Image (tube, grey):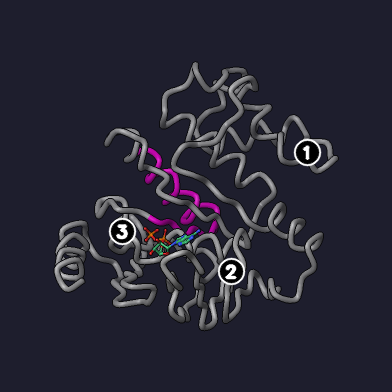
Amino acid sequence: MAVELDDLGKTYDGGAGTVTALGGVTTSFGDGTFTAVMGPSGSGKSTLLHCAAGLETPTTGQVTIAGTRLRDLGETALTRLRRDRIGFVFQEFNLVSSLTAAQNVALPVRLAGRKADGSAVRSALAAVGLADRAGHRPRELSGGQQQRVAIARALFTRPAVLFADEPTGALDSRSSQQVMTLLRELVDGHGRTVVMVTHDPVAAAVADRVVLLVDGRIADELTGADAASVADRMTVLERSC
Ligand code: ADP
C-alpha cells in the first residue's frame, strides 16, 4: 500500500479557539492508483495532503508511506523519506526561474549532495513529453509545460506516491487536459501512484476514485465517475454544508 491514513486528525489553535481541520480520516491509496480529493473550501483537503506528505504533523492518528510509519521517524529520517519517497507538485509549479528544465529536475538530488545522472534527467523529461525542452528556462515554457517539468522533478527519485495540490489550478483548460492525460499515463503506463486535490470535476473524473471531504471527514467516495456525476455530487454536498 503506497499510503495509509489511520484516524488522521489535525486541529489548529488560534485566537478564535480550536479549529478542527481533519476530524479522523481513515483511508488508503494503493500502489498504481489515481485518487482525487475534493470538497468544499475549508473541508481539510490541503491539510490532508500536507499531513499525508509529512509536511505537517497530525494531531492524532498516523500516516504510513510504503510501510514506514512517519510517526516513528526522527527529523533527519523524515526529511530523507520526504525527499526520496514522496513527490509533491503545487498549483504554482515552484520552479527556479534561473535554472533550465533539466537543472530544475536535477535540483533536489543535487541539493541532497548527490549527482544527478544526465541521461536519467533526459529520460525524466522525455517521460513528461519534454525531451526537446531540457535547455529551456521556465519563462520560455507554457504553464502546462512548467507543470510537466515540476512533475518530472517530483518523480525523479521514483517516490512511492506523488501528491498534487491543485496541479491544474493555474492552467487553461487545454493545458489542464494535457497535465491530466500525463498523470493518467504515469499511473497506467508506469505504475505511479497519484493523490491529487482538485476543485475541477473534469480533472477529478480522470482519477480512478474521488474522495469527498466535508468538515474534515470523508463524506463520500465515487469510483469511475464521469465529470457530470462528480459535479452533481459536489453540488449536493456543498448545499448540505
Ligand atoms: P481546504 O484545503 O479544503 O480548503 P484546509 O485544509 O486548507 O481546507 O483547511 C481546513 C480548515 O483548517 C479550515 O477551517 C482552515 O481555516 C483551517 N486551517 C488550515 N490551516 C490552518 C492554519 N495553519 N492555522 C489555523 N487554521 C488553519
Total labels: the figure holds: 3
Q: Nearer the viewer, mark 1 or mark 2?
A: 1
The residue shown at (65%, 34%) is 105
Foreground pick, 12 / 140? 12
Residue 202, horizontal then vertical, whole percent: 25, 51
Q: Are marks 3 and 2 in contact (CB under 8 Å)?
A: no
Q: Name the residue nearer the viewer: 26 or 176.
A: 26
Type of amino acid at the residue the image marks with label 1: Leu
Q: Which residue is mark 1?
A: 111
Q: Secondary structure at mark 2?
A: loop
* Quadrant occupied by the C terminus: bottom left
Q: Residues within 10 Å of mark 1 (few under 14, many from 20)?
A: few
Q: Which residue is mark 3?
A: 41
Residue at x 44%, y 71% (from the top left corner) = 17
- The magenta span reads 178-197
Whether disc 3's CB lies below 8 Å from ligand 1 is answered yes
Q: Nearer the viewer, mark 3 or mark 2?
A: 3
**Could you classify mark 3 by the number of other residues whose Cα lies within 10 Å: few (under 14), some (14-19), or many (20 or more)?**
few
Quarter-wise, where is residue 19 in the image?
Answer: bottom left
Q: Position of residue 118 (x, y in %)?
A: 75, 30
First in sequence, mark 1 or 2: give its number: 2
User: Disc 2 designates what residue?
Assistant: 2
> Which numbered disc, 3 or 1, marks the residue that appears first in the sequence?
3
Question: Could you tell me which residue is drawn at 71 percent across and 34 percent down?
Answer: 107
- Distance, label 3 to label 1, CA atoms, is 35 Å
